Amino acid sequence: MNPNINNNAPTYAHVSGIKWVVCEIIDHLWPWNKEGWRQHKAIETAGMALAIAATVAWLLAANRQLGASAVIGWWLGWSIYEIIIRMQCKPYIKDGPWWRHNYRPASRMDMFCYVMFKNLLIGVILFSVLRNLGLLQMVD
């Protein structure tokens, strides 16, 4: 881990194998940290509600009750919220290869690019799965 980064950097540099993979997944998918929950309970609670709403939007899309454009809108809203929360709770990004533990403080643009690209990849996977299963209504 980079010694120049603050205490918000992940602390799982000492783990390896499947435990490291699980820690990486959680770090990328869960934008909050313990300190964030204590300091910003109202904002964090609203974000949890937004996360649940975005999940419900994906489930409704899988159930053919919500169109692709509505899901994209919810996903964009979640992404904007995630950028704000990550800048408060996890203000770091990886620097260098993804498998290493080199972190540096994130600028606003770093965080914007990280969150939007990550959520774009997740969205493509979810859209592809739903589309291939015939569960997503696409606008013609």
Image (tube, rainbow, N blue to C red):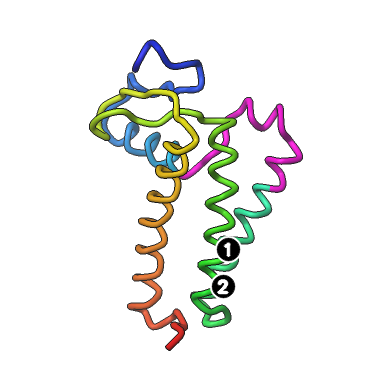
Count of numbered labels shown in the rendering: 2
Point 48% across, 16% down: residue: 6
Principal SS element in the magenta part? helix
Is residue 10 or residue 80 the one in the foreground?
80
Image height check: is 56 above or below 37?
Answer: below
Residue 10 placed where, x, y %? 43, 25
- Describe residue 48's horizontal placement relative to residue 117 as left or right: right
Image height check: is 77 above or below 48?
Answer: below
Residue 65 placed where, x, y %? 57, 81
The residue singled out by tag 1 in the image is 74
Q: Secondary structure at mark 2?
A: helix
Point 65% across, 54% down: residue: 50
Q: Is residue 28 magenta?
A: no
Amino acid type of the residue tagged 2 in the rendering: Ala
Is residue 62 or residue 94 the one in the foreground?
94
Residue 88 placed where, x, y %? 59, 31
| Contact? badges 2 and 1 (CB < 8 Å) | yes
- Describe residue 54's horizontal placement relative to residue 127 as left or right: right
Point 44% across, 80% down: residue: 135
Point 36% across, 70% down: residue: 129
Start-end of magenta stretch: 29-46
Amino acid type of the residue tagged 1 in the rendering: Trp
Image height check: is 52 above or below 111?
Answer: below
Dot label at residue 70: 2
- Describe residue 91's horizontal placement relative to residue 77 as left or right: left
Dot label at residue 95: none
